[in-house]
């Protein structure tokens, strides 16, 4: 088995202080370049790029949400004015469902996918079967860029045609599968049905779907012991990835070197306390398509148990994908958004933390704002909070005062506990 404890380059093993210093030093230039694009010029209007040299300064900038892309792009095709490289100077333009248009520039390993592949043991001279789709979406091309940087060979298999996938594996004997977990399971089951030997595939780099531990164990029991999960998206590229040391999977996912990651309270741009669950917000150092405080809509948390991964990579580790941050819920035919809950808490400084709990049965909804406060027995501000609930949501809601630390640290702003039976 390929040694997976070394790194792709020296950036991955930098002292954390050096990495942070270099990221902060690059922020003013990134923001100034972004402001040359009309979309970012509007979003960052009035921002002095030279003054954004710390995380605290960055946290004052507005959040741009992935869920806003369709509307932004519809107003200014194809990329909402967020691209600094003109469309005709790009390498590719992808079309995701929505439709959402995603650019690819001409630089090598543009999606930064060599890092997760290398961490999984992909090396120069290796052969991998790329089973991500080559049709409209960028995942397969992320792999192609990473493979070119590493120097390995690619079988451009795409998706579907399971029998041909098995035959290619049996005849060409790739060492690595890259694609979705569910498709590799289908390939293994088809190979068993066909009596084909695909035992050359001992590594798998997976994404685009959840990978439960039960399925990871199934792969190990069926000849693929080294399975690595990636966290990437069509607009960002690689965000974080799993690593291993001496054949043992390390906890968490290491953040990419060109990504400045924040975890914020869902519905706001305010960073959470270290280790708390919140929404993943990224600032991406990309000269063609810079993203400044781009909210992914995903929940995660910084891994606080150990300061450094055993694999030698020193960047921040996150717990991986932990659910969706957009907890917008319809109550009595009205949409209630996490941002509204955040605004209610902001208006009443005595609220340390808030969670809206929706209960009851459908068509008989009940809504209560659970508020962490210093003194749960002091109800003097409850009526004012109820007034804010009504003003901001146009709905009546109760208030429940609880002690600080009572609400779970799971990133939930709206908890839908209705009985749907």
Image: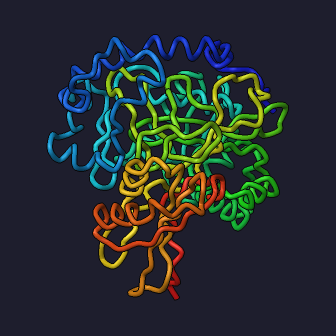
Left or right, 149 with reference to 124: left
Question: Residue 312: x and y, percent?
Answer: 75, 22
Residue 190 visible in the shown view? yes
Q: Which quarter of the rendering shows the N terminus? A: top right
Q: Nearer the viewer, residue 41 or 206?
A: 41
Residue 273 rendering spot, x and y as whole percentages: 59, 39
Q: Please say if 34 is above or below 142.
A: above
Image position, residue 248 (x, y; %): 83, 38
Tally of numbered tags: 0
Where is residue 293, by image quadrant? Answer: top left
- Tell me if residue 97 comes above or below residue 397 in the rendering: above
Question: Is 111 drawn above or below residue 9 in the view shown?
Answer: below
Q: Nearer the viewer, residue 357 or 208?
A: 357
Residue for point 74% across, 27% down? 307
Q: Is residue 177 visible?
A: no
Q: In front here: 73 or 219?
A: 73
| Quarter of the figure with residue 44 | top left
Q: Is residue 112 above or below residue 341?
A: above
| Residue at the spot 20% in from the left edge and 39% down from the top edge | 78
Q: Residue visible at 27% across and 52% down? A: 99
Q: Quadrant of residue 15?
A: top right
Residue 347 horizontal side relative to residue 130, left or right: left
Horizontal and vertical percent for residue 151?
Answer: 59, 22
Please name the residue shown 64% across and 29% down the image: 316
Colour scheme used in the picture? rainbow
């Amino acid at each position: 088995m390929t040694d997976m404890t070394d790194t792709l380059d020296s950036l991955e093993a930098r002292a954390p202080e050096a990495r942070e210093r270099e990221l902060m030093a690059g922020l003013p230039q990134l923001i100034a370049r972004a402001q040359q694009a009309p979309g970012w010029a509007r979003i960052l209007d009035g921002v002095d790029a030279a003054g954004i040299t710390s995380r605290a300064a960055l946290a004052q900038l507005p959040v741009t949400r992935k869920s806003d892309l369709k509307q932004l792009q519809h107003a200014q095709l194809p990329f909402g004015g967020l691209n600094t490289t003109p469309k005709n100077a790009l390498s590719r333009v992808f079309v995701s469902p929505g439709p959402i248009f995603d650019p690819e520039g001409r630089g090598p390993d543009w999606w930064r996918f060599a890092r997760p592949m290398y961490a999984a043991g992909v090396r120069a001279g290796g052969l991998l079967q790329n089973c991500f789709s080559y049709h409209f979406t960028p995942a397969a091309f992320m792999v192609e860029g990473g493979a070119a940087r590493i120097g390995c060979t690619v079988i451009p298999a795409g998706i579907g045609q399971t029998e041909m996938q098995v035959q290619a594996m049996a005849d060409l004997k790739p060492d690595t599968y890259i694609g979705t977990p569910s498709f590799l399971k289908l390939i293994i089951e088809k190979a068993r049905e066909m009596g084909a030997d695909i035992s050359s595939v001992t590594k798998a780099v997976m994404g685009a779907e959840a990978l439960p531990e039960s399925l990871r164990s199934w792969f190990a029991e069926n000849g693929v012991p080294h399975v690595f999960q990636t966290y990437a998206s069509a607009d960002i590229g690689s965000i974080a990835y799993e690593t291993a040391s001496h054949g043992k999977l390390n906890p968490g996912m290491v953040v990419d070197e060109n990504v400045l990651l924040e975890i914020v309270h869902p519905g706001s741009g305010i960073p959470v306390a270290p280790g708390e669950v919140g929404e993943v917000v990224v600032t991406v150092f990309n000269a063609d398509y810079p993203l400044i405080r781009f909210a992914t809509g995903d929940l995660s948390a910084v891994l606080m148990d150990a300061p450094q991964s055993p694999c030698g990579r020193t960047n921040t580790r996150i717990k991986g994908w932990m659910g969706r941050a957009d907890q917008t819920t319809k109550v009595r035919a009205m949409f209630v958004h996490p941002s509204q809950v955040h605004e209610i808490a902001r208006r009443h400084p005595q609220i340390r933390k808030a969670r809206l709990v929706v209960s009851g049965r459908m068509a008989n909804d009940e809504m209560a704002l659970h508020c962490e406060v210093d003194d749960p027995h002091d109800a003097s501000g409850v009526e004012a909070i109820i007034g804010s609930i009504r003003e901001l949501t146009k709905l009546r809601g109760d208030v429940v005062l609880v002690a600080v630390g009572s609400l779970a640290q799971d990133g939930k702003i709206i908890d839908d506990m209705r009985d749907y039976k």
